[in-house]
Structures are given as C-alpha cells and as structure tokens.
Amino acid sequence: MNRRLRAVLSRLAQALPVILGVVLVSFLLTRALPGDPAAYFAGDAADAASIEETRVKLGLDRSMPEQFGLYVLQLAQGDLGQSLTTGQPVVEELARRLPASLELTLVALLVSCGIAVPLGVLAATRPGSWIDHACRLLVTAGVSLPTFFTGVALIYVFYYLTGWAPSPLGRLDFIYLEPPSVTGFFLIDAALAGDAETWFAALRQLILPAATLALFTLAPIARMTRAAMLSALSSDYIRTARAAGLTSRKILFGYAFRNALLPVVTTLGMVFSFTLGANVLVEKVFAWPGIGSYAVEALVASDYAAVQGFVLCMALLFVALNLVIDLAYSMIDPRIGFDSK
Amino acid sequence: MLTIKDLAVSFRTRRGEVNAVRGVSFEVKEGETLGIVGESGSGKSVTSYALMRILDAGGRIKAGEAVYSGVDLKRASERDMQGLRGREISMIFQNPRAALNPIRKVGHQIEDVLRRHARADAQNARAKAIEAMEAVKIRDAEARYDAYPFELSGGMCQRIVCAIALACDPKLLIMDEPTTGLDITTQKAVMELVTELIRERSMSSILITHDLGLAAQYCDRIVVMKDGAVVEAGDPVRLFARPQHPYTRKLVDATPREGASIRELLPAEVRTPEPPRRISDEALLSVRDLVKTYAGKSGPVHAVKGVSFDVKAGQSVGLVGESGCGKSTTSSMVVRLLDPTSGRILFAGEDLAKRPAAGFARDPMRAKIQMVFQDATDSLNPRHTSRQTIAEPLRAMAGLKGRARAERIEELADLVGLPRPLLDRFPHQLSGGQKARVGIARAIAVNPAFLVLDEPTAALDVSIQAIVLNLLVDLRARLGMSYLFVSHDLHVVRLLCDHVVVMKGGEIVEQGPTEQVMTAPADPYTAELLEAAPKPPARDAA
Amino acid sequence: MNTMTEIPPAKTALAEPQAPPVRSKGALDHVIYVLRDNPVTLLAFAMFAVLMAAAVLGPSLVPYDPLATNASEALQPPSAAHWFGTDNLGRDVFSRAVVATRLDLLISVAAVALSFVIGSALGAAAGYWGGWLDIALSRVLDTIMAFPLFVLAMGIVAALGNTIENIVYATAIINVPFYARLVRAEVNIRREAGFALAAKLAGNTDLRVLALHIFPNALPPMMVQVSLNLGWAILNAAGLSFIGLGVRPPTAEWGIMVAEGANFIVSGEWWLAIFPGLCLMFAVFTFNLLGDGLRDMVDPRRRT
C-alpha cells in the first residue's frame, strides 16, 4: 500500500480514541452541573411525585454507565437532547448558530494570516531593522491582549468616540433582512443574491469583532513565521543553494519559505484552539449570535443538554480541524509516514 | 586562475570585532588541486566562504584582494556573484544529507541549478538533470531522480551534492571537509569519484580539511593555516619530510601513520620513553557468543550476532569497524549499560550478563568497569563544574566526603594534566582537550580495572588527539588498567592496542595481534579497510 | 620487564598550559550579570517588582475600601480624589484595581505551580521510561488538548462549581499538557546523552539520574513556558470571570471589573472597564517579558 496512504489512514485511526475520550469527558462534565434538570423540566408548580416522574422520563434515575450508553446511542442518531431554556432540539440550535461563529472565525484568521505571515517573513529577512523590532514588539504585546478587553476598547474608540463603526448589536443592523440562506455565511449569501447593500452592512458589522479576534491571533502566527524563517534561512541546504548561485528570490520563496511553512501550519492548529475559546468572549462583547454566546447563556441557566452539545461540538470541530491540518502537513512534508519518529 | 592576496575577514559580534582571517595569500593555478589544512579555528572554511561571498551576516572582507580569472571577487555586485556561483565556482560541504533540501526531490534540486544558469529549459531540464546524475556515477539515475534526501544513504547524498555542484561545468570546485563524518570506505569512494571528475574536466579545486594525510594524498600543493594566517605552504611530500614551521612540524608529527610509535606523535621536546607495562596471561574480560537483537519496524534487527573475544589483564584491545557494525552496541553491553539478548560476559570470574543493566548502578562491580565517552560536549553535564563532574562517582561509589573527596579530585586533576583552576569551570568554558581530560578523570576516579573507550578522540583536533592518546598510554601503565578501545580509525588503534578485533555487520570478521592483522590481514574486508585509510608520506628522521 | 621505572608525572610532559585562575562566580553574581546584560530583562523585573508590591502591600495602602459603596459618588470620571474614577456603585476603581492584583496573581501562580509540578513529573517519567506509561499519558494529553482550552476550562468550572479554587484547578488541568509534552521531549533527547549514561556509570539509580541530572537541564526552556503560562493563566481567570464563572461580585477582580464596565462603555463611561483592562495587560506583558530573563538566569551556558 502506498506509504502516504497508510500514514493518512493511521492518522484517521488515531483520531478515534480521541473522539471517544471527548465524548466521555463532555458527558462527565455536564452530568456534574449543579441544578436539578428534572425539577426544572417539571415546572414550578410540580410536586415531588411529578418531579420524580420527569426524572424517570429523562432517564436520570438510571446508573451512570446506562446513562452513558443512552447518550452514545442518541448521539449516533444525531440527537443532542433538548434545550431546557428554549425547548428546541440542541442540534438544530447549534446548526443554526454555527455559521455565524464560523464566518467570524474564518474572516479573522484570514485577515490575521494575511498580515502576520508577510510580517514574519519580512522580519526574518531583515534582522535588526525597524520592521524586525516592530514585529517583536507586536508579538510580545499582542500575546498580552485580553480579547474581551480589546473588544471593549475597540467599541469605545470606534463606536463611541469616532462613530465609524456601527452599534455592536450582532450580525446585521435590524433594518436589513437576512439574505436567503445558502451557506449561512452572510457575506457569501448576500453576494450570491446580488444584494450589495446587505453585503456591505454585514461587512460593517463584521469588522470590529473580526479585528478583535485577528489582533489576538496575529502574535503567535507572526512569531512562529519569523522563527521558522530564521531557522530555515540558517540551514545547511540554504547555504548549498546560495553556493550554487540560485537567485535570492528563488531561495527565499522556493526553498526557505516552503520549509518554514511546516511549523507554521502546526502552529495554526494551536491558534485555532485559542480562537475557538476566544470566540466565546468576543461573541459576548459584540452580541454575536453564534454558538459561543449560546453556550454562555446555557451555562448561566444550567441548561445541561445545551452546554454538553456545545462542548462536544467545539471539540469535534477542533479534532476535525487538527486532522485537516495534519493531512495538509503530510502533503507538504514527504518525510511523514516514513519511519518518522 | 584564483589569486588571494593578504585577505582579511572579520565578524561583528556582540563582544566586538573578531578577526577570523588575518592576511592570507595563496594561488590556485589551472588544473591544480590545492589543499588548505588547519585545525578548528584556523579560518580555513571562512576563507572559502569569503571568496564565494557567502559569509554569514556580520561577516565581511576587511582587506586584501581576491581575484578569479580577472574578476574582482571582493567588489563584484551580488548579482554578478550569483552568476559566478555554481557556474564558474562551485562548493560542496560537510554533512551531505543536511546540505540538501529535505522536502524537495533531488532531481528537482539539480534542475533548479541548471535552469538558473540557463543550461536547460523547461523541456529538457529533466533529461539534463539525469545526465548530471549519471556523470557522478549514480546507477539507476532515472529511478533516483524522484527520491527525497532522507531516502538516500550518506554516500549517495554526497554524490547528489556533487551533481548539483558540477551540473554547470564550473572551473573551480571548493570542497569544505567533504568526507568528515563518512565511513572510511565511503570516504575513499567519494574522494576517488571527485578526483576523477576533476581530472576529466580539467578543473582546479581547493580541498579544505583538518586531515593532513587526506590532503597529502589528493592535493598537488598544501597550505597550512593557523589562527587565521598561513604558516607554511608547499609540496606535500616535502612538507611531510622536512616541515619548516614548528606548527607544521607539530601537525605532521601528530598525524597517525604507519611506522610511527605513539610517542612520536608528540613534539620531540616532550617525548619521554614509553612506560613499561605488564600484560598477564589471564583473561580479565571474556565475551562469549554475545547477541543483541532489537525489534525493528520491519522485522528484528540483529545488531550483534554472536561475538566472542578476550581481554587479558593489562592488555589493550581495539574494536574496529564502520558505522552500523555493532561495535558501539557491543561496548555498551560490556560496560553494562545495555542488556544482551543472550551470551556471557565473564569478568574476573563472574558472568555480568546475568546482572540486569537497570540495577547495575548499585552493583559492587560497577566501580571496576568504567567508560570514557566520545563526544565530550555531550558527556559532561552542562550544569556541573568539572569538580562536580569528577566528584559524582566518588560520592556515589567511593563514599568520599568533604576534605578527602576534595583531595582526591585534585589528585585526579594532576594525574590527567588538568590545571586545578579549571576545576571550577563549566563545560562551555573549557576547550575540547580540557573536556576530554575531565571525562578521563571521571572515568578513572574509582580506580577501575577495565576501561571502555568509545572513540574518545574522534572529535578532537589532531594535535590534541596526540596528547590525549599519550595520556591514556601513561595512565594504563601507572594504574594497571585494561582497555577496550572502540574506534573507526585504524592508525590510532595500531598505535595504542596490542590486539585488534575487526567487526562487520554484527560479526567479528578477524581478530589477532595488531601488527599481524594490520600487515597481513587474513580477511578481505580488513584489507579493504586498510587500503581505504589515507597514507601520509614518510617523515624524515627528526 | 617486570621492574616499574619511575613514570614522570603527567604534569610536566602532557599537562595543559597553566590557566589563569577563574574568579568563581556564584549564583547571585550571575543573576546580577543577567540583569545588567539585557535592559529588557531589567525592565521586566522592575515591572514584576511593581506587581508584587501591589499584591503584597496594595490592600493595606489603598485610599478607599474596595467594597465600600457610595451611591452619591457613582460614575465619577477620574479626578484628583479618585484617580481611576468611580464605578456604578460609587466604589473607587483605583483601589479595586490594585486590590485585584493580589487575587489574580494568586490564582495564576497557584495554577501554574500545580500544573508545573504535575506536568513535569508525568512528562519526565513518560520521557525516560517510555512504555505503557508514555502511551497512556499521550492519550490523556491528546484528549485534554482535543478541547479548545478555554472551552474546557469553562466546562470544568461549570461542572465543579463556581469557586476560585475551581478556577485554579481548571486552569491547572488545561496547562498540564504543555509542561508534560515539553518535559517529555527534553528528557527524551537527553536520555541517551553521554552525561546521563556517565551518571549511571557513577553509581546513580535511574531515578536519581532523571531527577538530579537530566531534569535540571530541561529547566531553561521550561522557564519560558512558565512565564508564558503565568500570563495565560491570568487571562484565563479574567476571561472566565468575564462570562460569569468563578469570581462573583462584589469581589474585586480584573475580569469581572471589565465585564461590569463593558455595560457602560457604550454610554461613554470608559474608566470602569479601561483601567482594569490596562492593569491586566500590564501584568501579562510583564510575565511575557520575564520569560527570556528567567531562562538566562537558569541556563549555565550564559555564565561567563
């Protein structure tokens, strides 16, 4: 069997126990939430007997392993339970809100990479210059920024003081209608519907929250790009390329940059993990109707099915993403799968 | 063709300017091979980087001239230099696998150079690259074209590096330590290949090396450098027979060669007679049918396949072979850091193989067998001063404390010739030779009867090696130790050992008294090894 | 050939040329050298001293009681009387911000110390002995790292209860993988190094070799990780408080102050949120700068 194919399959197989662990942990966590869901479901006027009835109906009187078995069975059918606060199936609510979070995260990451990677490359090729110092300053300061604080500060400066940014009340100003839903991404859907006004409105609402997230992720990406480029540029094979007379451009982009991409791609995985967490904070500050704010509301209400669904969803998203990143890595690096340790 | 005159190169560092090269002059004529020989820090590599203008950031040519066929290398623009490099002047380096881009197919790397210097275009690049590979005698060039460096052996990688360097038919080839780190037989194959190609194409070349013997064998003229300056230059035979400069004399003496005794490695002024020693008839160490098998990814790996030899009390036995032959595994088992799969290790009557390696640290026999390691940088704890390093075995095994321990440490320092003030220094503050001495002091601290030495001088400059080897000779006589000396360097083994064991592929192919094996080898592999070792010219009687 | 003639001592024939005596530099000398050598390190330590002063002496030196409300003085902008202004309940923002230093530092130091000790022990054992311990540890670490870390902390605090101890435990758990992986890799590299083998030859048991010889050499890279983690831990705790987990009002904590203050930003009362946020940034920035300096102090190779 092709060595690469074998490596890919083994990587997929590695993900399985992790998924199992994730399911187990999310189950355990939310079974430990305070509050009695049976009492909540039964209603304010319920007496002990009907609370007990509700408890049996929800399956909360069974033993833990039995509950876990039930849980896994339901999962396999795509059933994440019912939200206590809204009465809707959790799966539907998550599906409805996921595109909002994804759109925000992806736009932020795109902007962030677009700035951080060139910055890191420039800083590495001109060590000691002002751009190198600026990069280092950005990296040290950027890692110190609390996302919720930057969001708040940005709102103050750009909304209250200068009035450039719109009011931080969600994805779209209420005078506009949502574009017909194809992907759930307003930017794409509005473009598909040919609706320029809505497109710009959606963009305007996106700018501040995306900027907040992007500021947060700029630092680690720039730092890793700079470090990886520096390391690549001082390698032996670059010396060989120089001695063979290859042009600076070829050496920089064809040789050094491609090799430097490897650690950068790995860092992206870590950055995405932080971003998914920071998402929660940013969505709260900007009243963004994504799964992060859904989770915060659910936590406060001890809505266990919703919280469980959220944690599981985030984790699975993350596992899937890491898988994609690892596969991308193995595409770039031919050494993977060959007796690599 | 190439004229270098009073070249001076300096580096800007945090502690000010460092002059790496101070006024070096030499010439390379058409079709000539020049050798630049020097120990570490002599500036030999920096000189070549400077004339290729590929110095690291912070390095610059401070003064002097460098002219190649009428082109002023010092003043040429970067663009002109990029045109020269690879097309007129090429360079090959140490460590061939690291010199190739790990994520690019080797064929494509050759193509890059061809297309850069307009020797091929998109249509015929592949064909021309394969031609370049065939020119360096790579069989199945078509198949190897799509390989990545990690899939190829060290020797094959060096051929690819040569292919890249020679693809555009340069007139001058600079070789910076091209054989360091390679096995002797691979070393010979690479040098023969390169020499043949240079001759075929009537090229000039510069061979930079620390190995005077290697330079003498392959170069028309030799330049000797020390501390950034040229101390002597001339014909290799004359240089070896009648060296003028004291440093050259020191280097020539220190180069291990046939017919020289170990004392003759040292400068004449410090030669003392070799101390006598007693070799008993009794075997102190007996290894019988030692086997080590690992579970590898694609089936079991037989590192050692049944090895038997004896070391008599007071004797020095050499264990030679190329990389992968199992000599290091064997020595690890003998010193009980590794458990054998089967076999016996009889030491003073006891079978040590029965005592597991994991618990051997607490065994009373631990103090009797000790080891001196190869790379002193790796074998000294970076956080410990020399004193603490030497104290460690005294603390754990001899139970010495306080005043008694301090005295013993100082005694050991004197014994190995380490000045006492150096006892309070950290490894990064010590030179290679000083670190080697600390390692030896640590090993002999508890008076072992048996010492395993795993390539103890491989990483040292040749003049330091001479000193350390002689120190080992003195110590074994003084302390009555037996040695198992593991090495790939046949000349060194010949100087130090009474008996030699030759290994290949996990088995012993030949063993016997050193003189006999080295002059009249019974096995063809031993003969091959002897043939491949560089043979420096003879020294006139000093 | 049995007579032993006098062997000249190695000193005369083969000894090293006499070296100039080295003024032995103790650990304190080295610390001072590192501080002088790199101005950034000096700055970082000065900032750290400010933080420590605020944490230790702050509560006794602040002008107002951080919990005392005063409705008539609510929402006053910064002035001579109230340097950072007052919040919606009339409490002095400056006093609250300074007092919060102690709480935030305590949380982060406790969490990082816990994860450092546990992560190092597990990682060192896994890196040295390998085998099933290594495999089991890797699976557990993978599972922890499979969650976006902040989300996991949210989940843990929500599950265990809304207390400060639980913030510490949650933060410690999500940080363990960093140390465990780092230590495992560093120990693995050095497991077969000459000095580790030499330590065994010198009569040390495996445990001693690991604890006293190999592990101390892993400390320099870990120092950088420790300082980064101290910063993250503060951000984490503040983030959790921001969404209502962990610290509860009226306790003064930077995250909760920004959360309460965020409601007033859109009406222009910026001082409630901005000042605590700046304090937060100052603390995290200090720890980030500290990383390289700490590593230099612990690394013997920087000693001259």
Image: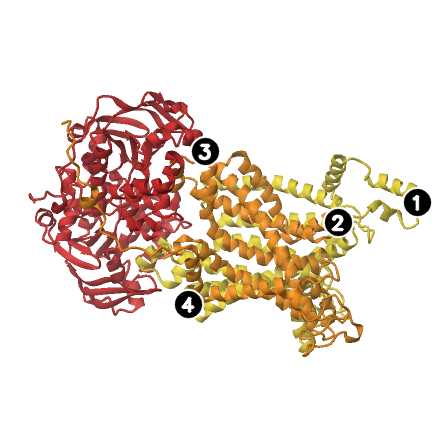
For the residues beneath circles 2 and 4, the answer to whether they share a chain is yes
Host chain of mark 4: A
Specify the amino acid type for callout 1.
Asp
Mark 2 sits on what residue? A91
Task: Please state if B269 lies on the left or on the right of C300 as rendered.
Answer: left
Quarter of the C terminus of chain B within the rendering: top left
Mark 3 or mark 4, whichever is nearer to me: 4
Specify the amino acid type for callout 3.
Lys
For the residues beneath circles 3 and 2, the answer to whether they share a chain is no
Mark 2 or mark 4, whichever is nearer to me: 4
Indicate the chain coloured yellow by its letter.
A
Mark 4 sits on what residue? A128
Number of the label disc, if any, that sits on residue A47: 1
**Disc 1 to disc 3, C-alpha distance:** 66 Å
Mark 3 sits on what residue? B297
Specify the amino acid type for callout 4.
Gly
Chain C on-screen colour: orange
Quarter of the N terminus of chain B within the rendering: bottom left
Mark 3 or mark 2, whichever is nearer to me: 3
Badge 2 local density, few (<14 within 10 Å), some, or many (20+)? some
Q: Secondary structure at mark 2?
A: helix
Mark toward the start of the polypeptide (2 vs 4): 2
**Disc 1 to disc 2, C-alpha distance:** 31 Å
Mark toward the start of the polypeptide (1 vs 2): 1
